[in-house]
Amino acid sequence: MPTKKNFYCDMKLNRIMVLNWLRLGLIVIILAHYFCHISHLFNFFETDMKPRAQNCFWFARVGSAEGDCYIVDFLHFYSGGLLNKERIEKNLPLDVYNSFLLTQTIERVIAPMRPIGTYCFQYPPMFFALITPLAYFDLYTAWRLWFFILAICVVITYIVIAYDSLADRPLLLCGLFIFITSFPVSENFFLGQTTPIEAVILALSFRLLIKKNYFWSGLIAGASLLKLQHCLIILIPGFCVGKKDFLRGFLITLGVELLLAIIAVGFDNIWHFIRIIYVAEITHSIKDLDDIWYYFTFTGMLECLPWFISSAAKIGQVVFVFICLIVLGAWLKIYPTLHKISNQSMQLIASITTIAFVTFNVHGCWYDYLLFIFPCFWLYIWSTTNESEYSGRQSIIRLIISLIVFTLPFLFWDNLAMKASENTITGYQLRYFLISMLLLSSGMIALLLEFKRYRNKPLLEK
Amino acid sequence: MHSAKHTYFNLYLPVLVIILLQSCSLTEDPGDSLLRKARYLQTEGHFKQAEEVYDKLSMLSFKEKDPLQLSILLNQARFYLKTKKFNKTIATCDKATQICQAIYGANDSLNRSILFILASAYAGLGEYDKALLNYKSIQKSASKSLCSKDVVELLPLIKSGDLEFKRNNLPAAFQYYLKALSIGAPDSTEMIARLINYRLALCSMALGNKCSAEIFFRNSLPHAFDHAAPRDIIDKYAQFVKQCGKQGSIAPALEESKLWQAKHKEYVDWQYARCNPSSRCVLMDKYTEQDYYLIDGIKDSLAKDNLLP
């Protein structure tokens, strides 16, 4: 004789099965739809990018017969390394942060071509310990080495985030392939940007924070200062959750970094770094850095709209400060409450704060969207586990969230590409922002559902 | 013991703070800010004021072997080249060569930049053989480059082609341009590929080869709204097609012209509202357009002297 309880249990199992199959079906459709984009990417790499990297026209794009070039970020780093190498080898008292010397070094690499405008290095001095060895190779070999290092960073980032789930769900490794071939990640490889290095630091530090290894988390989080604009993603949760232990680890790394910086660039250049940050970011004396319309952040989007051309930078800065306060509030007030009722509390709050920091950053580009791997993966895991603890309506919402976060890497390919009818990047910027807001909303709904799950428990137990 | 420690601390702390503040001057180096000012004035077309600032920069006393001095000299040489003060350009280049050799050595790749400026100055003075010799020396040094050989060779090839074009040695110019196109333009949408194609089109036209001229001209046209080119480029193409007697191709060319002009204008207006006049994108558009006009100028001067067939 089936009891009422058994009847509800059977219904719940059926619902879970139906939802799982439905999700699998939809994921297969999405993958099939984007398969040709993945093949295009490999084709582009093999037939277009690689030959141009070999003859170095990938790094310096000439715009006139006088030799004026646009420079790819990697050439910028390579030249920074070369300048520091000269300083060490010839014992010259060089300011490695001097924009004219850096521009001159770029010119030395690509002469008789020359970079258009002046270039300015804003990475902390310890970064020179990474880029100076590159100068011992020619440009193409150095780029291949850098590409390899970035690829390793991307793989480690994914495995560190997914480590706990991989034992039960080995198919999650397929996500690594999607991650590597998604637009922001491939752009990091092609341009040689440093966001994958920052991502691996954040991934390791977050993992240790989740495992309550606060000292070691702080120790690794100190390295996140490599990319100053993204370090708050880990430092705020670290200091709020890990407190003294985290601070101790962080201070030790800071000390090591300072020593490394003195060894890599010399004592004087540490002050030159502080000065260049002040000159570039506070006084805005270097006008070459003032174009913010191509930043793929809230500030960049505002600048692209006709109403905020002159005030976008200021509004962006105010909003960023506001976001920092909200994030601080979330880690100090919401996290402790959620932590008592959920084993995914840190992942959920960190998902929301990471999206907010990437989207509302005052300094960011499309390749920084690589950091969306954190919210995407964590929200996907959250939306596909503990199914039995949610009601029918909540399960449907979770299914939608799982599909949104699964589709996001693909959305960066064609849905965000420039349309043939578009003459400016305003629409492109708006789409980036709306997708980020969609993900942020998914994160917030996930947070609310996690609280509701706690309320569901007594009902479900009855 | 405890109080002694405190005394040491109280003594050392202000000293440390003073040393730190001394080392950390937040204002930009005077040489740097003057050079930045000179560059801005130059890009905004205030040549007289820019020259005054460059003169002030020359007065600055530098330590021996200062790479910043080399930067100033290179910028100054380019400024003189732009303002067509060729003798001053050559003198500045000579100074820059000495400093470059003292700092980086005789075989440093920066010498190629100096040789390139020097060659352009000789070309400006009408000393074409000297200019060609300098372009050849740049090409010879290609094997020592940190970059590829192609990057080093591209510009001397284009410029040698320009010199031969000026001298009405059209077959030689055509050969130089063709070689430049083969190494420097794996992707036809690249700006430099379009510029070389434009040169080839005008050269083919002067040689009387209308068929290949039409193909090169078509390849030199902008494809997308963000490609820089003179506003009337597609109209010129339509006129050229008309001259070739290919009447059927004019209508689509004019249609395309109107569409590109409208799109490009909208893009440029949108972008320039958000950039300062010395922004990279603004400067690059300007230089690309100037390059189209430069080759037009060579063709027009040949036509004026009745040297073209």
Image: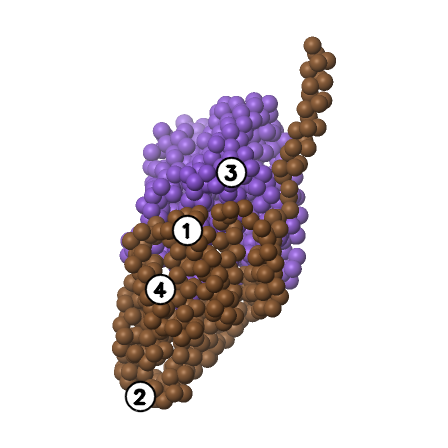
Query: What label does residue B134 carry, if any?
Result: 4
Quarter of the image with the C terminus of chain B in it: bottom left
Subunit under mark 2:
B
Q: Are marks 3 and 1 on the same chain?
A: no
**In the rendered image, what is the letter of the chain coloured purple?**
A
Dot 2 lies on which element?
A: loop
Tell me which label, 4 or 1, sits earlier in the chain.
Answer: 1
Q: Residues within 10 Å of mark 4 (few under 14, many from 20)?
A: many
> Rounded to the nearest whole Å, what is the CA distance between mark 4 and mark 2?
30 Å
Q: Can residue A369 be seen in this view?
A: no
2 vs 1, front mark: 1
In the image, what residue type sits under mark 4? Asn
Dot 3 lies on which element?
A: loop
Dot 1 lies on which element?
A: helix
Subunit under mark 4:
B
Query: What label does residue B101 carry, if any?
Result: 1
**In the rendered image, what is the letter of the chain coloured brown?**
B
Subunit under mark 3:
A
Q: Which residue is located at x 32 percent, y 75 percent?
A: B164
